[in-house]
Amino acid sequence: MESEFERSLVVFVLSLCLGLGLCLFPAGCKVKSASDVQGPSQLKSEEASGIYGSSYERELQAAQEAKALVELDDKPWPDMFHLTLGWVDLKGDGQKSRFKVIANWGSRQSEKFLTLVSPDKPEPIKLYLFWDSLCMYYPPGVKWSANADDPDYAEERKFLEKIKYAYGYISEADILNRADDPNFAIHFWGKDNGRIQEGRITIRKYKGQPKGFLNAKLRLEEDAMVYASYRSGVVAYDSEADEYFLIFYPDSGWFSPNVLAKADSWLLIGTWGGVLVAVDLEDYYLKRFDSSKGAIGKIDVTDSKIIVDDGRYEIERPILRTGEKFRDYRFKLTSLK
């Protein structure tokens, strides 16, 4: 059953939201502050940010209580991929159901299989959660086994619906309620800016340094500002203000940054997928230059030109703004079969 269930999945998912601060920028620059979305303006560190008193908090608490009811098997378990293995009395009648959670972490996506087998049911009920690690859409995809809609499995489904929050589930509605939580920064960047081919982007500022910032291999420093690779995107850190913000994130990890450069006030980002992205740091105006070839490995800036990969193509300086443009970009779960 499990292998057939896994093979039936076709996964297309379009991954911390930065906390927001108030800051003065040139006219037209869109900078989100915490007061725009929730209460007074406040910058929070990643460590200090928490889950608010909300429906999600209540769901998470209920999930932890359900998880505590599981009588775990003695270890060792079969392998490191088993997150939970045990028994649970769903109805309080002494008949225990077998419950297991298996995780799989790959370079492309991570996934969790929640399986419940009741002694009075002919087959298990299964819930599959998956996250595409290469994209910006954070809420997990959800897939149920075919019997999940069968009324005979209502008690089993109710249990899995409740306990899924203990294994990383969160809805987009819950994410939107925590616009100052850095754990969803990438999701918010996609929602704010993913459709922009050319135009001003929304910046969401956050206090402190982002996780992994000191280990970033790709970085460019200019006075108090440091621009560095962050997961599959680029983050800007202001050491004087001790604030950071996500300045660019690609549709997919295949288009992560490979080289950084500066031309006038523009930050130039050459990606593995061949797209050159320019962001004017004075007012956060973004422009994408598409290329049909592979990774950009070198950007040279002369007095009059920006030269990509020793002449693959050239851009005249200063970079010309041609007006706001949008592209076909779907920021949502596109398909589950």
Image (spheres, rainbow, N blue to C red):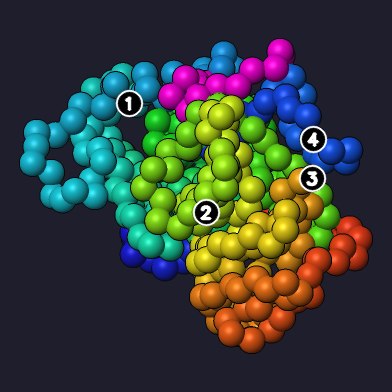
Comes first in the chain, label 1 or label 3? 1
Position of residue 66 relative to residue 211, above or below, is: above
- Write down the residue under mark 2: 220
- Among the 4 quarters of the image, the one containing residue 39: top right
> Of residues 324 and 77, which is closer to you in this image?
324
Comes first in the chain, label 3 or label 4? 4
Mark 2 vs mark 3, foreground winner is: 2
For the stretch drawn in magenta, what is the main secondary structure? loop
Please report the residue visible at 15 percent of the width from the left and 50 percent of the height from the top: 79
Mark 1 vs mark 2, CA separation in Å: 46 Å
Q: Which mark is residue 25?
A: 4
For badge 2, the amino acid type reads: Leu
Comes first in the chain, label 1 or label 2? 1
Mark 3 vs mark 4, CA separation in Å: 7 Å
Please report the residue visible at 58 percent of the width from the left and 27 percent of the height from the top: 241
Mark 2 vs mark 4, CA separation in Å: 22 Å
Q: Secondary structure at mark 3?
A: loop
Instruction: From the viewer's perspective, tell me whether residue 100 is left or right of residue 130.
Output: left
Q: Secondary structure at mark 2?
A: strand
The image position of residue 165, as x and y in percent, is 45, 32
**Magenta stretch: residue 193 in it?**
no
Mark 1 vs mark 3, CA separation in Å: 48 Å
Do callouts 2 and 4 mark residues in contact (Cβ within 8 Å)?
Answer: no
For badge 3, the amino acid type reads: Asp
Mark 1 vs mark 3, foreground winner is: 3
For badge 4, the amino acid type reads: Phe
- Write down the residue under mark 1: 67
